[in-house]
């Protein structure tokens, strides 16, 4: 795929406009399509503002910024995508809507064009089934903001031609991204493996082990995470985070490890969605600032217990993803460091104390609570028994 290939992006929201910027910065003529003219106009204005800021900060030369902007063409009719060699869909997470769009693309584009979906929670296989040539459909899951976040999860569906997956991965590398390949399972790598960071932290709060600020502080100062789980949920939006959690739980046929919490559901019902509404787990002023990060006093023993419990659940999830062939150990660790900025890859982190240590933590939790939520991965148990390392 040459840099002269026309790239189409469907959806002029934050993610779609970000992907269009990435493609144009990589040198591709890019068509940004949305049926809503006001959305396209807003996206184009926002893109120009972003490019202007990059020039002001000295990160782009004025001529380069103008060339990038000139490479992006707005469109409100799908036929404008007819000459594209790659089209990336970034619209609402609704399977029926996506399948309708892909059926239209399948009939419109040349037979050698690549079709990609940016879905974060739906089946790539199901989306591809709308096409007469499902072999050319692949998942390309970017992370927000797309121009800044390096990770892209490359997801082949059941019918995806391996050559299409390889081409997509090579293209993402050419665009300066860090691609990881993963199986078409709910949540892919990041949204699956990261669930306990939120879920187990909420559980600790519900049990009265510690308040939200203490849990956040412990995971940042002792665990080394960039943001605590509660402030991160407020940043993401409690409605979005709750929907992802519920979707993963339902997609795994109600696997107990992913069960949503009533605490987060009540936050959503109250309309306390986080920074965007001024209130979530914390209260925010008009500038989006809150008292979070005020460094509450945390006893070293309590803080260590919080971190160990959350980390044990994360490591178990990463181990199970490896056990079930979701991705390679290298890609699982890369996904968590590049996609959600974890301080270390979880499998490499597990090696520091050894599989036996983390197994003992999980066994103790399962014995105490009697829940399958704390069921250790068979791979973790096997590695502990054989004193093996992940890396």
Image (cartoon, rainbow, N blue to C red):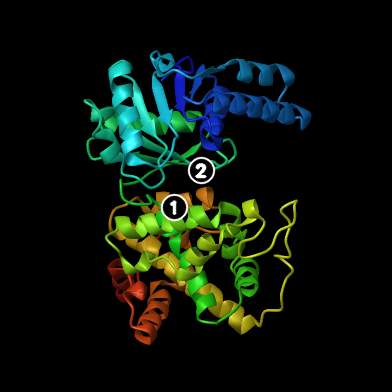
Q: Position of residue 80 (x, y in %)?
A: 44, 14
Q: Residues within 10 Å of mark 1 (few under 14, many from 20)?
A: many
Look at mark 1 in the image and give the residue it sits on.
190
Instruction: Report the residue at 64% width, 74% height from top.
Output: 214
Which residue is painted at 61% across and 57% down in the image? 274
Counting other residues with Cα less than 10 Å from the Cα at mark 2, is it few (<14), some (14-19), or many (20 or more)? many
Secondary element at image label 1: helix
Residue shown at 30% from the left, 66% from the top: 379
| Mark 2 lies on residue | 143
Viewed as shown, does residue 22 lie left or right of 333?
right
Q: Nearer the viewer, residue 34 or 312?
A: 34
Q: Nearer the viewer, residue 186 or 310?
A: 186
Look at 60% across and 72% down and name the residue there: 215
Rendered-image quadrant of the N terminus? top left
Location of residue 102 by image quarter: top left
Residue 345 position, x and y percent, is 49, 57
Furthest-front residue in this view: 270
Distance Cα–Cα, label 1 vs label 2: 10 Å
Element marked by disc 2:
loop
For the C terminus, the quadrant is bottom left
Q: Which quadrant of the figure has residue 169?
A: top left
* Residue 307 seen by the camera: yes
Q: Is residue 269 left or right of residue 162?
A: right
In the shown orientation, is residue 169 left or right of residue 237? left
* Residue 62 rendering spot, x and y as whole percentages: 73, 19
The answer to which quarter of the image holds residue 323 is bottom left
- Residue 24 to residue 250: above or below: above
């Amino acid at each position: 795929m040459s840099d002269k290939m026309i790239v189409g992006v469907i959806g002029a929201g934050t993610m779609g406009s970000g992907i269009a910027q990435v493609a144009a910065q990589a040198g591709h003529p890019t068509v940004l399509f949305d049926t809503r003219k006001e959305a396209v106009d807003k996206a184009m204005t926002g893109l120009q503002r972003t490019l202007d800021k990059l020039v002001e900060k000295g990160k782009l030369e004025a001529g380069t910024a103008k060339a990038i902007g000139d490479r992006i063409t707005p469109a409100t009719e799908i036929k404008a995508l007819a000459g594209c060699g790659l089209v990336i869909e970034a619209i609402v997470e609704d399977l029926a809507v996506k399948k309708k769009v892909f059926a239209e693309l399948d009939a419109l584009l040349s037979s050698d064009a690549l079709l990609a979906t940016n879905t974060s929670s739906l089946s790539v296989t199901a989306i591809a089934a709308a096409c007469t040539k499902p072999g050319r459909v692949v998942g390309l899951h970017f992370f927000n903001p797309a121009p800044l976040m390096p990770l892209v999860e490359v997801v082949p569906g059941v019918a995806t031609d391996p050559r299409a997956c390889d081409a997509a991965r090579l293209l993402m590398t050419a665009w300066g991204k860090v691609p990881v390949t993963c199986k078409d399972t709910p949540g892919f790598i990041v949204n699956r493996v990261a669930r306990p960071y939120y879920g187990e932290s909420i559980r600790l709060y519900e049990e009265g082990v510690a308040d939200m600020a203490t849990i956040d502080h412990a995971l940042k100062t002792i665990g080394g995470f960039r943001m605590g789980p509660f402030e991160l949920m407020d940043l993401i939006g409690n409605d979005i985070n709750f929907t992802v959690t519920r979707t993963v739980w339902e997609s795994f046929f109600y696997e107990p490890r992913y069960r949503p919490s009533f605490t987060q559901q009540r936050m959503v019902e109250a309309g306390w969605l986080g920074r965007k509404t001024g209130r979530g787990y914390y209260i925010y002023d008009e500038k989006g600032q809150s008292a979070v990060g005020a460094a509450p006093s945390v006893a070293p023993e309590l803080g260590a217990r919080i971190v160990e419990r959350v980390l044990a659940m994360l490591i178990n999830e990463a181990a199970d993803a490896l056990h079930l062939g979701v991705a390679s150990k290298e890609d699982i660790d890369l996904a968590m460091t590049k996609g959600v900025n974890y301080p270390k890859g979880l499998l490499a982190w597990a090696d520091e104390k050894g599989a036996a240590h983390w197994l003992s933590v999980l066994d103790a939790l399962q014995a105490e609570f009697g829940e399958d939520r704390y069921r250790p991965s068979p791979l973790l148990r096997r590695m502990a028994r054989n004193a093996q390392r992940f890396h």
